[in-house]
Image (cartoon, grey):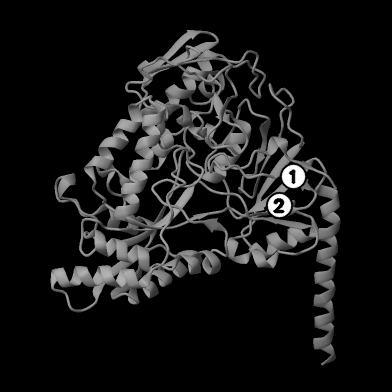
Amino acid sequence: MLGLLNKKVIAIIIVFLLIVVAYNTTFETNKDGVLVLETPATPRYLDPATNYETTGGNIISNVYETLISYNGSSTSEIIPVLVEAIPTVENGLLSPDGINYTFDLKRNVKFHNGDIMDADDVIYSFTRVIRMHQGPSWMVTQVLNESGLIKNDDHSVTFRLYKPYSAFIFVLTHTVCSIVSKDVVEAHGGIEDNSMNEWMNTHMVGTGPFKLKEWAEDRSFISIERFDGYHGTKALLDEVIIKSVSELTTRIINLELGYADAVYVPPTMLDEVRGKDGIVVNEGAMRLAGYFICMNCQRPPFNDVRVRQAATLAFDYEFLMDYIYQGLGQRYVGPWVHGIYGYNDDLDPYEQDVEEAKDLLKEYKAEKGISGDLEVTLYYTMSEISDLVAQLFKSNMDDIGIEVTLQFLSWPSLLEKVKGKDVGTKDEVIGEFEAALLGWLSDYPHPDGMSPIVKWDLRGPGGNNAWYRNDYVSQILNESEVTTNESRKLEIYHEVHEIVAEECPYVWTIQPNTPFVFRKWVKNYVESYNPFMGRYYATVYKDK
C-alpha cells in the first residue's frame, strides 16, 4: 500500500514538474515579437505553382505576393500589390473587349535574396505555372497560354487572353499567380514540363513581408521571419512559428500555459476553451465554402424535381445549425455562398416543412404508381461532423417515406461513384449514386469559381456533382464568363440563383465559419475570408 502511494506521489510530482518546465519554457521561448501557432496540419508543398491546399497556401501568401490582392478581408475590393494600378477600361489598361490586361510594375521591389523584381520574373512565373501543369494551373490555363504573356518593357507586362473572361482579375489573386524569382528558380532546376520542382517545394524566395527561416526536416514546425527589405509596410512581428501538434489536448494545454499564442480547436470542442482566463474564442470567420447533399438528378427517384424539393423541405436545418455546428455557420442558397460577388441576398433559404414535403412525395408516388417507401443510399466520407449530418438526413427522410441507407466510403471511392461508370461517351455516363454528402471550396471569390457545380458541361466530380441539367442555366453562365457588362453579369447570377433554388439539385446545408482560438495578448489576429490566403500575419502583434 505504501509502495502504491509512493508511486502516485511520484507521478503527481512528475506531472507538476512538467507543468513548471512548460511554464518556464513559455517565458523563455514565447517572446513578444514571436507568434507561436499550433495546428494538426502541416504544409505539403511551398511552391505556389504546385500547392493546392490551405495550409501551404497560408505560408505562401505571407512569403510570396501576387500582382494584386484583396483589401483586408474584403472579397470584392481588389488593390494593387506589385503593380501601380488595377487594369480597367477607363484607365486604358484593360482593352474594351476584355482580352488584354496590362500591368505597370511597382519599381524597386526586392526579392528576399536582394534581387529586384522585373517583367522577366512576372512572365517567368506564369510560364512555369502553364508548363508545369500542376493542380491549381487550370485557373490560369483556362484563358491564358504562353503566347499571351507579353513583355512590354522591364516594368510592364500584358496578359492577352485567348478568350474574354470577366473573372480573370480574381484569378490573379490566387496563390498560384505568385511572383517568383526567375534567376533563383533557374539556379535550382528551372522548369520541367508537367513536373514539380522539388527544390521549390521546400524553399522560398519571394517578395512578401516575411521570408522563410526554417522548415524542420521532420515537418514538426515551419518558421517565417520579418523581411526588413520589404517594399510595403514592414511586419510588426519578428517571427511566426507554426508547429504541427496532432493532439488536441496538448494544443489546449500549451495555449493555457501560454506556450502557444494561438491553436486550432475544432468546432465540436470549443467548449473546452470557452470562458477560460486569458483565452479568446473567435467564431466569426466566414469561409468561402458551402456544404451540401447532392441528389443525382439523372437517376430515380431524384430525377424528379418534386422528390428533390421534398428532400429539401424535410431537412432539419435548425438542428443542423444549433446542435451539429453549434451555431458556427450560416444558411445559404447555392451555387454561391455569402461573400461571393453576385450573391442574391433577397433569396431566402429553405426552412423545414415536413407536411409540404409529404404532399410532394405523395403526388410523385401516385403518378408513378408507387405504394411503399422510396429507397436511396447516401454516400459520405467519415468524420464526426459528416456522420452526424448523414444520420440527420436519414432520420428526416424516414419521416416522409424515403428509406435511406448510409454507406461510408473513402474519398477516392466516393468520387468514383459521383464520376459514374465510363460506358464510352460522357453523354452516356450517369453517376452511380442517389445521394452524396459533399462540399465546395471556392478557389477565388467570384461566381465563376463556384458555378461549375450547376453547369452540365462540367458534370461529374470536381464540378456538377449532382448531374443537374438545365441547358439554359449553362448557357447564361457561359455568357457571364465573357461579358464585360456588369449589370448583365449580376442579372445572370441572380437568375441562376433563383432557378437553382427552385429546382433543388442540392440540399444546401451550411456555409461554415472557421473559429480560431488565441491568447488575449495577440492583437489584430483576423482570418481572411479568402480560404487560400488564410491569415495575413504582417499586421498581427502581441501586447502582454
Of residues 500 and 285, the one nearer the viewer is 500
What residue did someone put label 1 on? Answer: 35
Q: Is residue 203 visible?
A: yes
Q: Position of residue 412 (x, y in %)?
A: 35, 55
In the rendered image, which quarter is residue 187 located in?
Answer: top right
Instruction: Give the CA separation, mark 1 to mark 2.
Output: 8 Å
Q: Position of residue 69 (x, y in %)?
A: 56, 30
Query: Are circles 1 and 2 on residues that touch, CB within 8 Å?
Result: yes
Mark 1 residue crowding within 10 angstroms, few (<14) / some (14–19) / many (20+):
many
Apparent side of residue 229 relative to residue 527 in the rendered image (left or right): right
Of residues 262 and 474, the one nearer the viewer is 474
Q: Position of residue 125 (x, y in %)?
A: 49, 23
Q: Residue at x 33, y 43 (%)?
A: 496
Regarding mark 1 in the picture, which secondary structure is present there? Answer: strand
Q: Residue at x 39, y 15 (%)?
A: 96
Q: Residue at x 44, y 25 (%)?
A: 128
Q: Residue furthest bottom?
A: 1
Q: Position of residue 243 (x, y in %)?
A: 66, 50
Q: Which disc is residue 262 wearing? A: 2
